[in-house]
Amino acid sequence: NGHAEVVPVGAVSKGLAGAELAELGLMARSSAGVRIFSDDGHCVADARLMRRALEYVRAFDGVIAQHAQDPQLAGPGACCHEGEISGKLGLPGWPAAAEAGVVARDVQIAELTRSRLHICHVSCAETVDVIRWAKQRGVNVTAEVAPHHLMLTTSEVVSFDPTYKVNPPLRPDEHVEAVREALADGTIDAVATDHAPHARHDKEHAFAEAAFGMLGLETALAVVLETMINSARMNWAELAKRMSIMPAHIARLADQGRALVPGEPANLVLVDPAARAIVDRDASTSLSRNNPWHGRELPDPVVATIWAGRISYQKQL
């Protein structure tokens, strides 16, 4: 409908099975011009396969985006941060080491191959430490954080509400603090919504059996504004860099994240920093209702969006 630019992400492995390299070159040379490759919710657990993928994409300035989840430490049943709460609730634990360990391996392979690596949805303090170390060494690594990992904590899971089942899981307060600091100082380069709409029947199960994921697109700016701007951790120029300039740079999107000057592509968002509202999942544009912010008061900043020079969204005032 012309409301947004849609850019495909290619798989790293065939069938997302983690066994055989997908046709990265063919995807890159296709009319889609794919530059980002990821097995999405599946970790590229095989170190040799990761090395081959990183070596391959270097030729055309591609990037491998990793969902860091060691399948031996956090297998298919893992659904809650491993700690006191997971023990009390009897939920299979997902330790921070399962994320940080994969990232530690991958940044060293990226250094070896001199290729571009991107770490998806960083959720824990240990991963921040690894990325900071890698950047100090000059490794070509970037990272993102999802809005929910900037605000929500493991305490939400006590309700057994499957809306709060997400991968990677919500973490305790000290991890939330660490990723906020990392976003503020640039160790984490970007915010990515990790938007995951689900039908009701996918979420209306016991916590351990429900689908992973929550809505994040419509409220992304609101959550970052609340956690980073209103707390004086970042200013608006820094927010624009994390949510527009750096995502465009990582994905090599030429018409996005550009300066607001005459002659530049008119892809804009108009915001009212002072506006606030109670989030109502039933008023969401999404057809899904797995909204973790329902009933919370948050900023309501988006007044209008302009795509390719025309208004693509306008708030009803």
Image: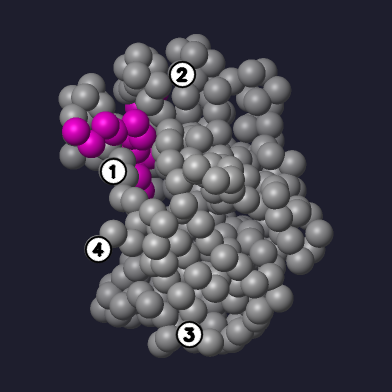
Q: Could you tell me which secondary element the residue under label 4 belongs to?
A: loop
Which mark is drawn over residue 1?
A: 4
3D distance between C-alphas at marks 4 and 3: 20 Å
Which mark is drawn over residue 316?
A: 3
x then y, percent, for residue 16: 24, 40
Q: Could you tell me which secondary element the residue under label 2 belongs to?
A: loop
Range of magenta residues: 31-48
Upstream in the sequence, badge 2 or badge 4? 4
**Of circles 2 and 4, which is in front?**
4
Q: Is residue 151 above or below residue 113?
A: below
**Of circles 2 and 1, which is in front?**
1
Residue at image position (50%, 35%) is 249
Q: Is residue 280 above or below residue 198?
A: below
Residue bearing the label numbered 1: 8
**Of circles 1 and 4, which is in front?**
4
**Of circles 1 and 3, which is in front?**
3
